[in-house]
Amino acid sequence: MLGWLMNKLRPIEERSSGAGYTAQVIAARDSFISGRRGVAELTATVQSCVSLWEGGFAMADVSGTELLTRQTMAMIARSAALNGEAVYLITELGLVPATDWDLTTRDGKPRAYRLSIPEAGGGRTVTALAAEVLHLRIGTDALTPWIGTAPLRRSSLTGAMLHAVESALGETFENAPLGSQIVPLPDTGAEDVASMRGAFRGRRGSTLVIEGVAQATAAGMNPQIGQKPDQLSPDLSRSMTAETLAAAREGILMAYGVLPSLLNRAATGPVIREAQRQLCTWTLQPVAELLAEEARQKLGVEVEIDTLRPLQAFDAGGRARALSAIIKAVAEAKEAEIPPDAVAGAMRMVDWKE
């Protein structure tokens, strides 16, 4: 009886689960802004590539389902570009994104998920079977086929170099005495030197030093001879900063499937079209096919996703010239009384649909 009474009087111990609103905000900031490594994801080069992925998926043609809206496709592309995977809970109201998840597998395939769903007043946890979850993964490894890897994680050395170079340049332009000079002046009184120092404008952190000529060149008949202002700005050209930065940017662009010529200032129309075709054909469309296959398995309907036609990732001028040449060839074949079967066979040989 006494033990029961003591248990009643004892205060109930409560523990925080760590899944509140603050934890959700911190997780969202860390995952979707800073990325998995928190380094190169903050550079303009990576964000430009992520924007290309996001825009390409937002413009894609989706047939067979209404769950993959343009907003959802854009979020899927951004999550895949930064994290390598995207997890969405399939509900009667649509696809609900998950900020965090863990899963169980059998034969390397997911069986069940425990998802953290974001909410304005604090996140909630949902347990769902694999058939209720849309899980897109890119860059999967044979050791962990249920986990996707982002392009930056697969090229972490180049990403770290890009982050280091841009961070060093940022610190240099913030702290270095850019534009400051050491100006030699004749020896005079302290008040005159102070007034002369105050007359200069545009000093960076009072780094401008005015030295007396006598202390610099020793006494002489003509102390002004051979004197000239000395620059305090660091010479970044000797450290090959521009070349290193350009190489790191090109490596990141290629990791995301973007041709470096797309961001070249001297790029022309044909180069831009070729870069767009390269991005859509070898990067965006394969990822779209993975997403379509996952949607077909989970939704039970035939889903097709096309990123080539909406983005016009093809050489329209070249196809027009080819069509003109084929029409001309067909007209000449009719004039030469060539059998239609032979003409159709020739068209099939060049892979042109009638």
Image (cartoon, grey):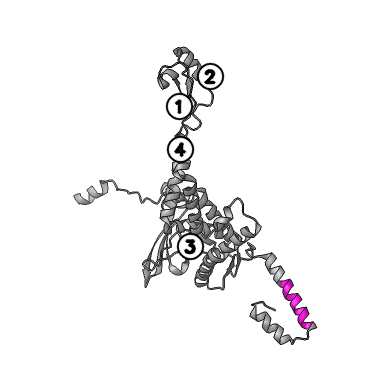
Above or below, 78 relative to 191: below
- Give the Cα separation between the discs numbered 4 and 3: 46 Å
Highlighted range, magenta = 323-334
Residue 277: percent from the left, percent from the top? 60, 63
Q: Which residue is mark 3?
A: 89
Pointer 4: what residue? 172
Vertical relation: 170 (above or below) 324: above
- Residue 215 is inside the magenta segment: no
Q: Position of residue 321 (x, y in %)?
A: 71, 69
Give the residue type that dot 4 points to.
Thr
Per the image, the residue denoted by label 2 is 199
| In the image, farthest residue toward the front | 221
* Of the pair 289 and 159, the residue shown nearer to us: 159
Q: Residues within 10 Å of mark 4 (few under 14, many from 20)?
A: some
- Under circle 1, the secondary element is loop
Residue 108: image quadrant is bottom left
Whole-percent x, y for residue 44 in the image: 52, 48
* Residue type at tag 3: Leu
Could you say which is closer to the camera, residue 18 or residue 51?
51
